[in-house]
């Protein structure tokens, strides 16, 4: 068991819908707690009362692309100020199911929204805050589509076609190229135990286990 650091670490989980990231987040939180970390589990859009209300709108209300971007970043701002930054300052490890890479992947690559505007909003809203580690659950869009078909009724993103998710995947790939040391790419097409082994390896490699 290693001693937790004074300032907490910020870990994000990313991937296209159906990649399976949500099914690992609780196990990851438990593993980190076993290794001496205080852990806060949260998600985007969401994570505060206001941001969860914005999430409901983003996922279900029809809107244009700019409105969608502004609501996602408004939710992120509230989440950072009231949840993520205080938790990190208190020494907790924050596990966040999606963050700004999702905006570049979904709104940027998926919807075709201007990447320079997204980068400006990223700077403005985050003031330099970036994840310390991003676990990218990468799966073939066709595999993810088959998994989604077996799941619950789709939201505005989950109902998109495979070409949309091909673009989202390339959006994640571009973010990885821009920040290779931050990203751990996982083969999320593997079975559950094999995906978990890759998650554990990424943390141990960083000396966090
Ligand atoms: P998701 O995280 O997959 O939650 P659930 O497992 O409950 O469906 O759903 C959130 C959706 O929001 C997902 O389809 C991606 C989308 N999203 C964006 O389009 N942009 C963003 O910046 C974020 C954080 C999420």
Image: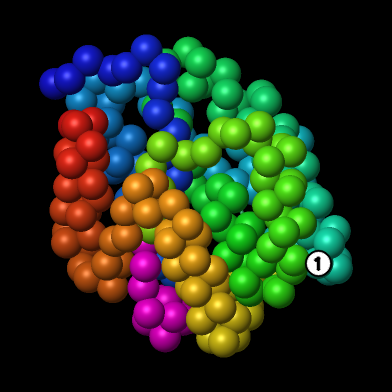
Left-right relation of 109 to 37: right
Mark 1, other Cα within 10 Å: few <14 / some 14–19 / many ≥20: some
Q: Could you tell me which residue is drawn at 20 percent across and 55 percent down? A: 198
Q: Which residues are magenta?
A: 137-149
Q: Residue 182, position in %: x, y?
A: 39, 46
Determine which quarter of the picture holds residue 2.
Answer: top left
Q: Residue 124, position in %: x, y?
A: 74, 38
When the figure is inspected, residue 33 is found, relative to residue 198, above or below; the finding is above
Front-most of 112 and 20? 112
- In the picture of the structure, the residue carrying the numbered disc 1 is 65
The reply to whether residue 16 is visible in this rendering is: no
When the figure is inspected, residue 197 is found, relative to residue 112, above or below; the finding is above
- Queried whether the magenta region covers residue 145, the answer comes back as yes
Colouring rule applied to residues: rainbow
Determine which quarter of the picture holds residue 116.
Answer: bottom right
- Queried whether the magenta region covers residue 134, the answer comes back as no
Secondary element under disc 1, as helix, strand or loop, is helix
Q: Could you tell me which residue is drawn at 30 percent across and 67 percent down? A: 188
């Amino acid at each position: 068991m290693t001693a937790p650091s004074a300032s907490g670490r910020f870990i994000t989980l990313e991937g296209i819908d159906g990649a399976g990231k949500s099914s690992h987040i609780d196990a990851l939180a438990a593993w980190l707690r076993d290794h001496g970390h205080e852990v806060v589990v949260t998600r985007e859009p969401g994570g505060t009362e206001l941001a969860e209300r914005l999430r409901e709108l983003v996922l279900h209300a029809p809107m244009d692309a700019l409105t969608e971007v502004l609501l996602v970043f408004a939710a992120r701002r509230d989440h950072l100020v009231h949840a993520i930054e205080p938790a990190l300052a208190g020494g907790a490890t924050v596990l966040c199911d999606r963050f700004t890479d999702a905006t570049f992947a979904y709104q940027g690559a998926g919807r075709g929204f201007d990447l320079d505007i997204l980068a400006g909003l990223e700077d403005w809203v985050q003031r330099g805050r970036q994840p310390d580690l991003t676990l990218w659950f990468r799966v073939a869009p066709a595999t993810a589509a088959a998994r989604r078909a077996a799941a619950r009724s789709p939201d505005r993103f989950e109902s998109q076609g495979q070409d949309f998710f091909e673009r989202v995947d390339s959006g994640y790939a571009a973010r990885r190229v821009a920040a290779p040391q931050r990203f751990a790419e996982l083969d999320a097409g593997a079975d559950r135990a094999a995906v978990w082994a890759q998650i554990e390896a990424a943390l141990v490699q960083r000396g966090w286990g």
